Amino acid sequence: VEVVRGGLADKAYRQNEVFMHWMTTGRPFVALKYAMTLDGKIATASGDSKWITNEQSRTYAHKLRSIYDCILVGKNTVLNDDPSLTCRLVEGKIVLDSHCQLPMDRKVFTDGAAETLLVTSCRADAEKVAAFQKLDQVTVWQIPEKQGALDLGILLDKLGKAEKTSVLVEGGS
C-alpha cells in the first residue's frame, strides 16, 4: 500500500483550525462577528443597533454561536442591549467588565441558559465581586490590567487552560 503524506494537509488543517490553534498555542481560537450599516456604523442614526441586519444574517449569527465554545461581549453591550447570548449548544458566555459595574439583574447573568463568566480586574470592588459569585451559573475571574484595560492575553491563557477552544466575540465598538 502506497502511503502519501501531506497531500491534503492544507484542507485538513483548515477543517481542524480551531483545535489546531488551541493545541499549538494553548489559547482559544478567537473570531469576531459584527454587523454594520452601509455607511460603516454599528447602529442606525437613531441609535438602534438591534436590527441593522436581516433575518438571514441573524440565523447565521445563531449558527456561529452554536460552533463556538463561548460568546464574549463587553460591558456596554450588556448595558445597552441586555442580551441573553443564548444558543442551545453554547457552553458559556463571557462578559468583560473591568470595574464590575454591571447590574446583577441583566439577562446574561439571570437567564440560566448557560454558565456566564464575568471577567473583571483585580481592582474591582470586592463586595460586588462576591455578590456576583453568589449568583447561580456565574463565575468571576479577576485578572490584571495592562495599559489600563483587562489583560486579554492572560484571559486567553486561562480560557485555554479551561479547555475552551474557541471564542466568538460579539458586541459593539
Image (spheres, grey):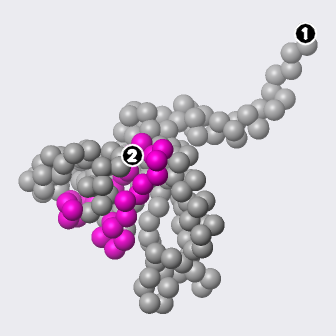
For residue 147, say whether it is visible.
no
Q: Residue at x 50, y 85 (%)?
A: 44
Q: Closest to the observer: 167 or 153?
A: 167
Q: Residue at x 46, y 47 (%)?
A: 88
Q: Position of 143 compared to 39: left or right? A: left
Q: Which residue is drawn at 47% across and 61% down?
A: 170
Q: Residue 92 carries which label?
A: 2
Magenta stretch: residue 36 in it?
Answer: no
Prevailing secondary structure of the magenta residues = loop
Q: Which amino acid does label 2 sit on?
A: Gly
Q: Give the range drawn in magenta.
A: 78-105
Magenta stretch: residue 93 in it?
Answer: yes
Q: Closest to the observer: 148 or 50?
A: 50
The residue wearing badge 1 is 1
Q: Closest to the observer: 49 or 75?
A: 49
Image quadrant where one finds the C terminus: bottom left
User: Residue 104: x and y, percent?
Assistant: 20, 60
Q: Residue 166 carries which label?
A: none
Q: Considering only vertical position in the picture, is 173 above or below 65?
A: below
Q: Considering only vertical position in the picture, is 65 above or below 107?
A: above
User: Residue 9: x and y, percent?
Assistant: 77, 32
Q: Which amino acid does label 1 sit on?
A: Val
